Image: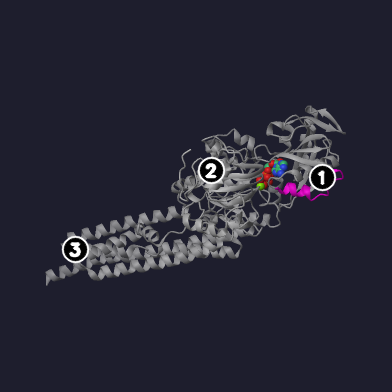
Amino acid sequence: MPLKPSAYGPAVEAFWREPTNSLLRSLDTERCGLRQQEAEKRLALIGPNLAEPSGTRSILQKIVHRLVNPLIAILIVAAAVSGFSGDLASFVIITLVVGLSLTLDIVQEHRAEVAAEALRRSVAIQADVIRDGAIVALPVSELVPGDVVELRTGDLVPADGVALMARDFQLNEALMTGEPFPAAKTTEPCATNLPAEASNTLFAGTSVVGGSGVMLVVETGRRTRFGMISAELLANDPPSALEQGVQKLGLLILKLTLFLTLFVLLAHLVAHRPAVESFLFAVALAVGLTPELLPMVMTVTLARGAQRMAKRQVIVKRLSAIHDLGAMDTLCVDKTGTLTEAKITLAAHLDPAGRPSDRVLELARLNSAFQTGIHSPLDEALLAEDSPPGSSAWTRLAEIPFDYERRCLSVLAARDNDRFLIVKGAPEAIMARAVAVEVDGLARPLDDSHRAQLVRLEDDHARQGFRLLGVAIRTMPPDRVNVTTEDEAVLTVVGFCAFADPPKRDAADSVRDLRARGVGIKVLSGDHAAVVAHVADAVGLPSGRILTGGEIADLSDRALAAQVEDVDLFARIDPEQKRRIIRALRQRGHVVGFMGDGVNDAPAIHAAHVGISVAGATEVARAAADMILLAPDLSVLGAGVIEGRRTFANISKYVRMGTSSNFGNMLSMALASIVLRSCRCCRCRSS
Ligand SMILES: Nc1ncnc2c1ncn2[C@@H]1O[C@H](COP(=O)(O)OP(=O)(O)OP(=O)(O)O)[C@@H](O)[C@H]1O
Ligand SMILES: [Mg+2]
């Protein structure tokens, strides 16, 4: 295959087809990674591993960016006209004013950027890289082709590359392929030309949802597939509400200026004044009208806002998000970890008849202990229980990681010569895959009366706010060493685990505070409707109408947009539906915030005007967020809204004060120039 040199040189297009050893050779690296010195050399040569072009522009770019601003453009035209017409004094003065304003602006922006960058760095995503033979945690921006990186569940894949080691390695590639189910990764090179089919390839921006692996970095930065997409996305990124407002204001001032200048010019010409002098006067008026310090006022005010938020333990990754937070009128939140403490405890383990059962605990705990995927608080609650006697006789063989479509998690486990698939998950997901139920140690067919009994058991617990997980088992052939989602069928329900998850102490106060400030709250949860209603009740949200994922699946985007206004609680919704709800709200003209912590929340965080995440969230959620709360304290949201509004108020104060007084002054100057001159002429003529 012809090699296509990358910026670094040795990497190849369709690199997944290369045998691993030849790829290692062409990247001039080894399985034990690069030497630090060599990595630094490569970093200097090819630049940082950033998918988006670096947020900080060069000085020249900054100047050009400002020159295209209509407000500055007016001044430059004025300077040019003065210069050409020989009015040197005006030319020098205007050029000086523009130069001073630009310098001040750029210096202030630079300072603000340095401060914001330091804050951003404190929440930067890191990768475990092997350098000089040892594992070090480095910011992903420092990765170079040839690096060897260790990946675990919940990690974001930091660059494009191939798997050198894979252990039940499952990736969510929805970002690349739109496929919500996890894709299993192996170390074997593939013959395919299509990246989506390359089972040994890991793409930047996808996330690990199960198992672990080691990756060889082949392409970094904008040469990754994600880098190419994100450059495109960035180009098509709609301007934020603040940017739109400032653009509109600039155009309005431009129109006013044109109008006033033309008006004055015309009036002067009608009065037979010298044309050049009149024109210069009109241009001077235009200069007086422009609020030339606006760009600087905006950057500095937003940066100050970010620093004040940092004191409250909120890291602002995108400055204009502060304004969006102030403008936000709807905040959507995930339930666990945002409204609740996420300190989940196991409250009961019951057989299908509702009696305490140690077998249920033993199987559920084995499932949690053997899975290597994302450790949810539910798994942690199970692992916090003492392991029942006999657990040590089990060994782990394989697993099917949890995903939000199936809503269940399976492990293949062996005891003596027997193999079992142990499944736990949302009760509906378990029952949909079950054909039998274990009663007093005996498997019975899962008939309608048993189903009704199980549903009643779940509803009773959910109404009291307990989350329920179903537990089921299936005997597998003794030679089975691997399992797929197709094996999650003909299960036997063993029972349920009930979990308690109390609401955060300050949740009710924060919800009241936000609502008093005109911010409506909606809960978007993957949990059972009755549990969502219970938590909503506890934090003081109306728990009236609930829309479920099943119902949303049948709604078109337009029908959903018509419903989202009146519904505050959404239950059993999957990640894509979370995003659809955010989009529907945006379409209805709302400024929407979304706060969440899981892999499943990332699409919605991204889709919202203000994406908010928390310190303990998964990398994927933190990477998608505009703001990260470092303290588990919801009251900062109310404070953030005030901060956003104050920032906006400061900017509009400057604009209003600046433009209204400028406009008043210039208008009176214009009128005076016409009227006074006319009077003088009259007097001259009469004398
Ligand atoms: N580790 C797990 N093992 C088995 N089932 C799980 C696991 N984690 C979650 N589930 C099931 O999937 C459902 C949805 O997951 P989860 O509650 O995390 O979604 P969510 O949208 O983040 O909800 P929340 O609003 O509560 O944070 C859960 O109610 C539970 O039934
Ligand atoms: Mg969650």
Q: Which residue is mark 3?
A: 276
The magenta region covers: 375-392
Residue type, numbered disc 2: Arg
Question: Element under label 2?
Answer: helix
Q: Earlier in the sequence, mark 1 or mark 2?
A: 1
Quadrant containing ligand 1 reads top right
Q: Amino acid at mark 1?
A: Ala
Sooner in the amino-acid sequence: mark 1 or mark 3: 3
The local secondary structure at tag 3 comes to: helix
Return the residue at label 1.
Answer: 348
Real-space CA distance between mark 1 and mark 3, rounded to the nearest whole angstrom: 90 Å
Q: Residue at x 59, y 32 (%)?
A: 554
- Asked if labels 2 and 1 touch by Cβ distance under 8 angstroms, the answer is no
Image quadrant occupied by the C terminus: bottom left
Residue 232 as seen in the image, left or right of residue 166:
left
User: Which of 567/587 is in front?
Assistant: 587
* Residue annotated with mark 2: 583
Q: Is residue 384 magenta?
A: yes
Instruction: Identify the residue at image location x=20%, y=64%.
Output: 85
Q: Amino acid at mark 3?
A: Val
Instruction: Please state which of the two labelled residues, at mark 1 or mark 3, is closer to the viewer.
Output: 1
